[in-house]
Image (spheres, grey):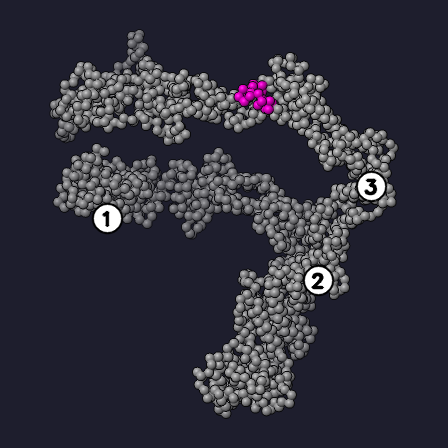
Amino acid sequence: YMVLRHMLYSLTENENFRPPVMKGRRKVIKYSLLCLKSVTPQECYERKMFKEEYGEALVLAKQYGLDCDLVYQRQWYNNPVTIATIQDYLSKVSKEEWVIQECMNRAARDYETTRELLQYGLVKTSFREVMACGPEGSGSRYDEEREGELTLEAMETELTKCERFTAQQTKLCQYRHVLLSYMDSLLTYEAILGGPIAADEHFDDEFFINFRSKNLVQAAIEYAQEGNGRAVEILFTHHGHIILPHSLPVLSNFPETTSVKSYKSLLPYIDGDGGVVLMDLEQEPHRAHDWSELPIVRQHCLIPMDAHLHLGKFLYEETPAWKKYQAPVTSDVITTWYQERAREIEQYSGLVDNALALVELGIDNGIKGLDLIHHHLKTLYTLVYQCNCNSTVTLSQVESMSDLEKLNLMTKEGRGSPTFITTFVQMAAPFLSRVEEMEGGQARRQLLEQYMVSLAKDDLVSCQAIFQQSAKKQVVSQPQGKAIIRDVGDMMSLALKCVYACERCDQLDAADKILECLPMGTAGLSEELLVVHKDIDKLEDHLSAMEILNLYGTQKPISHIRNIQDSPAEAKQLMVKLTRGASRQPSSGSQETFWRNLLQHLLTLRGRVFTCVEPSTCYQVFTESLLCSGQEANIQLASQLLTSSLQTPSRSEPQTSKATPTSGFSYQLPYDKSVELVVHAAREYFNSAANYRDKDMTLARSCLALIKERPPAIQSELNLFSSLEIIEGCGLDLLPLQVRLCENKLDIIKRVLEKCPDAYKQSEKLFRLAHLLGLDGVETPVAMPTAGITMAPGQGHTSILIANAAIEKGDLRFAHKLCSQLMSAQFSPAWEVCRKLAGLGQFKELQRKLELTSFVLTHCPGEELKRVLKERGTMEIQLLSAESHDSGRGSVMQHIVTKGTGVVQHFIGQRQRPSSVLEKKSGEDVIDECLEQLGDEVERLYIEEQVERMNLELSYHPFYAPDGMDVNDQYPFSYEIEPAVPSPQLKLTQRLLRAQKVAESLADQERQSDCTQTLLRLAMECSDLDTHLMLSYLLALPQVTAADQLFSKMEVSKVSLQLAIYYACLHIYARTAQSSNGEPLLCCPPAHLMGHVISHVIGHATAEWPACVQPAVELLQCYRTQLCDHVQAETLLGLGTGIDVQRFTQDLDYKRETILSLARTMDTNMFKTAQSLARRHKVAEWELYMALTTWLLTEHSLSVSEAQKKLGDPKIAEVLLSNPQETATRLEEETYPLIHGTKYGLLLVFYSLLQQCADEGAKIKNGRVDLATHVSLLKRFKSAVRGMDYKTLMTGEDSVSVLRPVLLATNVHLIAKLAVKIPCKACDNGILTSEVVFRVFAEKLFMTGDGKQSEPQDMDGWIERLTACGEYLNQLGHMELHTFAETTLLSPEGLKLPLSTRIELLGRLVKLWRRALNGASSAEVTGSSEEGRHGVAMEMALEHLRSVRTAALKRPQECSEKQWSSFMNELELSFSQRDEVYALCSKMVSSGLSLDVVDKVLDVTHKVQPHTMSVFSLVQEALTQALEELRHTDSEPQDVLRKIETVISSVRHHEQESGRLVSSGQVLAIIRPHCSDGSHTVDTRRALLHMIEKHLTLGEDDLNLLILYQTQSILLNQFAVEATLDHVSSAQGRTALFTTLLRQATTLDQLQVLECLLETWAEDSRFPVQESWCELMEAMSSVVEGATHVILARAGRSHVPEEVDEAIWHKLSSGSVVHGLKYSLVAGGVVMKKSLEQLQQEPSVPIMSADVLELLILKKQVSLVVSMPFYIQLCVHLQSPQEDISTELFAKVLTCSPSELSERLSLHQPSKRVREVAQQLCDGGFKAAAGSLLLSTQQFHPNTLTVSDGVTYVNRLMRK
């Protein structure tokens, strides 16, 4: 406003606009002179230059003798390059070398100045200047005028006189060489820009700097790549000697899209003399040859002479293919370049015209060898630009194409159109002409012939147009006046080839028109053309035949008619096709007339074309077509042409084509041919039939009925008809054609057996099927010698198949019956099935297995004999083991086979499936282990049972006694003569011995089995039966001493000892002498034998006997000694007992328990002993039998059969029922808990006995099931259910889980029937129902299958599983059906099924439920009835799954695959139930999943079951619950806080993605009240505020709250002051609070707390805390051990007042010089300088820490401590990486992370650190120290180094 008034007043001078008069103001400024400081002239000089006061600086320099060049250099640097600056500044610098370098390094922004600068540099490097730098100052005699007069030769002469150049001369020459190249580049750049005027306008200094330093070849390449042909031409013109040798690679870099004409002048050519000219350009160098480029100068200055020759080397390294274009270039190389360049242009750009233009220019330039590629490019040009061909056709494809393919492409578009001839003449005719020019006229004719023949295959109309154009009568009318086919002969022959080449059948008219174009007469034709004319006549016949074929719909190309006219078979086949096609055509007239006309046409074809076919063949084909026409009337019509019986003669000869048709057929086929045709027709109908009841089967029978007899061929067909009926009856769905084509008819029987597993039981039906299929006549029938009948081979093979089927079905008895018949008939092929049956473990009849194996041995191949023999031996061992097992039932052997590893049980057939360990063993190992286990167990158990020693009684069997022998004379001791019956144990052990011997024979290697224990057991068993046999067993022992094991078990008596002596004597005598009278050894009198042997033993020492009898001699002597001892002891000792007699008489309980324990045995004698003891000691008999019963029911070592057999003794029941109540009580309370629930037999005995007690009046503690029911259930379960715990089942706690594992298809119906008797607490009324049983089995069958098939892999497999469960699902009610769906498809186990599969299966279950309610009313179904509830639940689940599938939710990126899969599984199992959906969505929100995904999940479930949940409600609930949990949690709240932060982060991310489901404000409203809630801890509230600050936006109040909580948390337990909101909400409050706290702080810990507080406040940029930091550091410096913390605190601070730093430094230095120095180095500035100066004045300097040394290096103060003692320590610190520095300190100093320190400080690069320090030393003037430091790193010994060495080394290093 004031400005406007001033303006108006100045213009108008009106007083109204006069501005008010401003009162004057006076401003007084007072200055105070604080100090005066003197400076050196050098410092003043530098300050003047710094202030750009160059005039005053120049005066100072001149006055004090300083370097004036620094002024001019500074001015030169600070101003742009102009002509004025060159003259004013650069020309006044006295340092010539620096001036020249500036001329080289800098460039002006305009062309003229740049040229002037380079010219100035050339002046400075002139000949005079160079010579002036010579050793003798020779340049003084050359002034500028004299230099201009010198010629190049004179200069070279003068230069020759110089022996060598000085260093300065060498540099000047090198500089001049560079300046000359820069000047040349500038002139070239000027020419490229378009001359001096254009250069001034468009000059680019940055481009020129780059251009002048660039390789000229590289520059040419770049210009060529830009398509700048003019620039390339200029480079070739002015720098041809450098670039021209690489001209071809340069030209190859032009873009392929660039027109060739733009660089036409650069293309190489061939001159008139045949020489190669690379480029039609004159070389115009920018300047003459300079003296610096003379060879002598180059030699002195080390400038290579051939440097320009290597400029293009990179071209051939990057593209080795260009090496062939290097000089010298020949004409062949030029030709190759043109060809390859043309290919490149076409390949990379697709511009055929550019490639063609290049080749045409090459041809114009005289390049040879381009004709072929020119032809190809011309062809490609025609295809691409004229023929509208596919643009993807390339030159390489054209070159690889044949001429025919090219011609086809040219005429492809016009084929079949009226413009075809025009297109052909315009496109193809020039191509044919070029072919004729290149290859001759014959090539044109051949190409045209190939083209027309190939064209005629699909398009004869186009060929017709060419023939019409070429006809003589039409040639004149053509615009060109020239025919395509020039010769009449060529046209005739080509017409034949084209018509016969046509593969289409609908171009008969075109063929006729082609014939019309040919000459009609033969006049004037040559002999060759006459031959062709005859072929044309044949062509007419072929066309007429083709017309007949087309008439009946049999279309064949004419070439086919020509090819088969001389082939009777193919001609007949064509007639068959003709008649068959005619039979399918509808006829307008009568059928008979139609067929007669057809016959006449057949005869016409035969007469004109197919003369090779007999007339009877035509009738045969005609009759066959009638039979196969599929109409009954035609079949009856064919009967007129057939001979129906042998007695009916055939009529006359067949008529020819010229015969006149009559009302009847005058010809009949012969009888054999008639039968053949009828059978053939019947077979056709049979083969085309779909099944046995097809109408074609009726037609087949009609055909066969035309022949009255039944010859074998017809009978065979009728048998096949009958076989179809049987096959279909067996349920096998086979096409009749499949039955006929089956090569091996046994496969049909095999498939019948596979389709119907029970079909094997109908063997007679299968035998008849084999007969009908013709299996009886394969081989000669086999006789059955036993039955007196024969077995046909078909029946035999069928029997084998049936036997195999019976084996697969498990009907081994039926299979054995068939095998027995086959064995009776000696049917050799049956050996395999017999072997298979014998090898089955389920086939337990070992005797029959041996019979089968014997048959296999008789008939098997030789290579199988060894294995079969081994199998038979194994079976024999099994039989022996089984007999041993059977004989051992109820005995010790039964105990053996019911325990252990299962080897014995499996081997003898008592266990179906072997264990995994057993499966890995070989058969031989199994046998060995089986026999070893049997032997060991039998021996051990026998030893355990025989507690007392054996009481030996000799038994002399009468069998051994000779007639008249007196036994009393032979045995001086006790004996007993009576025939004894061998015990089962004896037979058992004998079988075991034989089995061991058989196993020994089966072994692959010769080995002796150890039968010692078996022989000992046999000897022990025979000790009471047959003494001689016992001795025989003992004598068979491999070691004589082994018999001692038996004798040691015998009770010591005279008899046992004498028997042992007798055994030893027998052994000795048998191996040393023979019986004198030749009698058997055992028949020799024992007394005589023992006396004889003993007398010899006594008379000789043991060592004198042979080694084989020495053990026996020792044994004999031992037993003789024991016999003597026994005789003496017998007198001293009385009878002893096995019981503790003293305790037995004194302890009544011991007495009773001893008697009862004796009663718990299977041994009858021992039980009798117990009975006698019981009677004697008054133990009740009931107690004995009760103890025995309890033991039998609970003893696990006994088998069930043994216990049942023993308990079946009526005496037991009689005694126990004498006290029924006590018996029942004891059974229920003591016995029942010990009985295993899977032993049904024992439980059955238990409940039967309990029932008897109840019948006698005992009171039974009945459960929910009475005893009779228990007995009934156990009887049914015993045969149908195995492995089930009956006791657990009857408790009713979890009956379903008990039943589930044992439910099978074979027992499910039985268990369902018995379900009403089984308690189940989970079921209604506490009783199991049949529906539950069926449901449980259906679940098991659906989820696990029947065990025979693997788990389905697709939907069809699961549907098949569900279908298999249909039988059981139909038994279920609505509730159980729903339960089935829940446990299979709607359970976690069902998730293994794909979602689509579960939807499909659940839909089927819903349909099943609806069918079950088919009769119910809608009210019953949809109302509140139970059926409706379950159905609606399934439908809702189905709708839910469909909704999930439709939604197709995708996994978000932030969610892992595993977590997403878990969420999807929970979603599928939620079934849109609100609670489940709420739990799932809450979990998704808490896990940080995208809120959009949660919203989609809510939308999916809302469609099924509407709910009111929203994403906001879920977020609100999640946060509220977490916050409440925070309020009441006692443990670490980190997990809850992490959960809250996850939810907040999700909301923020959702809001960033423009989501509107939840906003930050809503979340903030939920959390903010808790931030100020006192019930939360301070840490918790602070953590919540941190979260809000991190993810949301904090307001000022919230920010103050956050600072308050942080402050309170830090001050907790340290200060009594309580911070409030007023303390932290303003700068004054914080300052006051800090001051108060600082006064109270007395310890270092409290000061550290304050440091932490300031760091926290520093994060809030609203209130600075710099002054507080200073106060804190001063306070810390006054505390003991606070120096380190002060230094760390200072390292992170900036802008600390200098006086504060100085005060703290003084305090720290007073305590420790090292701490003071360390602090000053961290602070820097004036304090650092003072500290170092004070350190230099210290008389003694302590050892410095690594931190101080590193700080000195970092602050570049090493030069100040060179003279100090710890400098050596610094050198050592440099050369070895120091890892013990304070990472925290240096991280703060360098403001980086600790992990970056190593790189920032170069800790792992000592050499680099040394160089940096050496540079510092050099800058400080300590070159000697720097050199010594550097040399010390080069492994020089310090004693060998001198100051001069160090200085020299540094100077050399710095120059580098």
* Amino acid found under the numbered disc labelled 3: Pro
Q: Which range of residues does the magenta coloring cover?
A: 427-448
Q: Residue at (58%, 19%) from the top-left corner?
A: 429
Q: Look at 85% across and 30% down and name the residue there.
A: 660
The residue closer to the viewer here, 32 or 836, is 836
Q: Label 2 sits on what residue type?
A: Gln
- Assess whether mark 2 and mark 3 are in contact (beta carbons under 8 angstroms): no
For label 1, the residue is: 1681
Q: Which residue is mark 3?
A: 670
Which secondary structure dominates the residues rendered in magenta? helix
User: Height in image: 730 above or below 1197?
Assistant: above
In this rendering, the count of numbered labels is 3
Q: CA distance from mark 2 to mark 1?
A: 113 Å
The N terminus lies in which quarter of the figure? top left
Q: Is residue 1590 above or below residue 758?
A: above
- Specify few, some or many for label 1: CA neighbours under 10 Å numbering under 14, 14-19, or 20 or more: few
Which residue is labeled 2 in the image? 826
Q: Position of residue 1106 (x, y in %)?
A: 47, 81
SS label for mark 3 = loop
